[in-house]
Amino acid sequence: MSTMLLALVAGAVVGLALGGLGGSGSMLAVPALTYLLRFTPAEATTAALVIVTLTSATALTAHARDGNVAWRTGLLFAAAGIAPAVATGTVSAHLPGTLLTTAFAVIAALAALRMLRPAPTETSGRTHPTRAGAAGAGLGAVTGFLGVGGGFLAVPALVNVLGLPMRRAIGTSLLVITLNSLAALTARAGTGMKLDWATIAPFTAAAILAAHDAKHLAHRLKATTLQRTFAYTLLAVAALMLADTLI
């Protein structure tokens, strides 16, 4: 299979997850770039930030048109994560590839297990500022370090910590992912890393197109079916990455 076709297929899967679930697609972007498209771990995490930033911003506009973005809440949540995203993004570019791959595999497995759990219960209680700030900062740190948007963490945090309804949590998570990914990407801009834009461009284009149509597909499928499919895929990817690194 040609590099172009692999990039298009992988991009479509990433866009489907980001547009339909408000996250998790970026967890597939890094292993796709690493194992299918032969990027180094450092290159893959940086390229994933480019892809996730542009795709999330596109998906965000669709959710915003439907009124499913809590702008003030999302901006406050994202603000807590910008500094950690910049800090870990700067450090990550200089770490060994084996460490990045192992850390990513562990986070991917945890994300998959989290997705297999029952959906978080929506609450209407008052937001606790300390918990909200800690959740936002933790999400930013993960985004910068591993090049993932962190939607698998953002959605449950927005529901459980900030009390948003699930539909608005998904839309708002895209705002948080976009801002955190952009901050982490900015931190890596001065590292001098060269990226394969001939591969990243079609990957991103396919992700954007898929994200645009993801909501229509999500309405046809049960949300739990789509979520479980991605969860089991993530578990398989995490297992393969750990095996490749440790054996």
Image: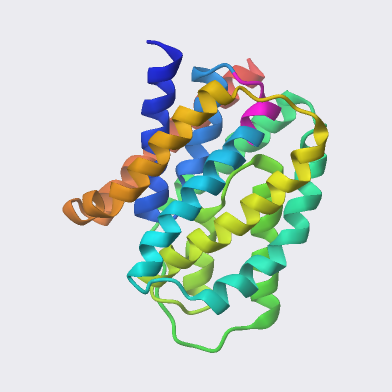
Residue 124 vertical position relative to residue 25 in the rendered view, above or below? below
Q: Is residue 153 left or right of residue 98?
A: left
Instruction: Name the one closer to the observer, 153 or 217.
Output: 217
Total numbered badges shown on the rendered structure? 0
Q: Position of residue 237 (x, y in %)?
A: 48, 29
From which residue to which does the magenta span run? 39-45
Instruction: Report the residue that reaches farthest toward the left.
Output: 220
Q: Position of residue 205 (x, y in %)?
A: 42, 36
Q: Is residue 210 left or right of residue 113?
A: left
Quarter of the image for residue 166 reads bottom left
Q: Is residue 53 magenta?
A: no
Q: Could one spot residue 209 in this view of the protein?
A: yes
Residue 75 vertical position relative to residue 209 in the rendered view, above or below? below
Instruction: Name the one closer to the observer, 150 or 196.
Output: 196
Q: Position of residue 73 (x, y in %)?
A: 56, 77
Instruction: Report the residue that reaches farthest toward the top.
Output: 1
Quarter of the image for residue 177 reads bottom right
Query: Which residue is depicted at the point 41% across and 43% down?
Result: 208
Residue 168 vertical position relative to residue 36 in the rendered view, above or below? below
Question: Which quadrant is home to the N terminus?
Answer: top left
Query: Which residue is depicted at the point 70% across and 29% down?
Result: 42
Q: Position of residue 40 (x, y in %)?
A: 66, 21
Instruction: Name the one closer to the observer, 168 or 225.
Output: 168
Secondary structure mainly formed by the magenta segment:
helix
Q: Is residue 43 magenta?
A: yes
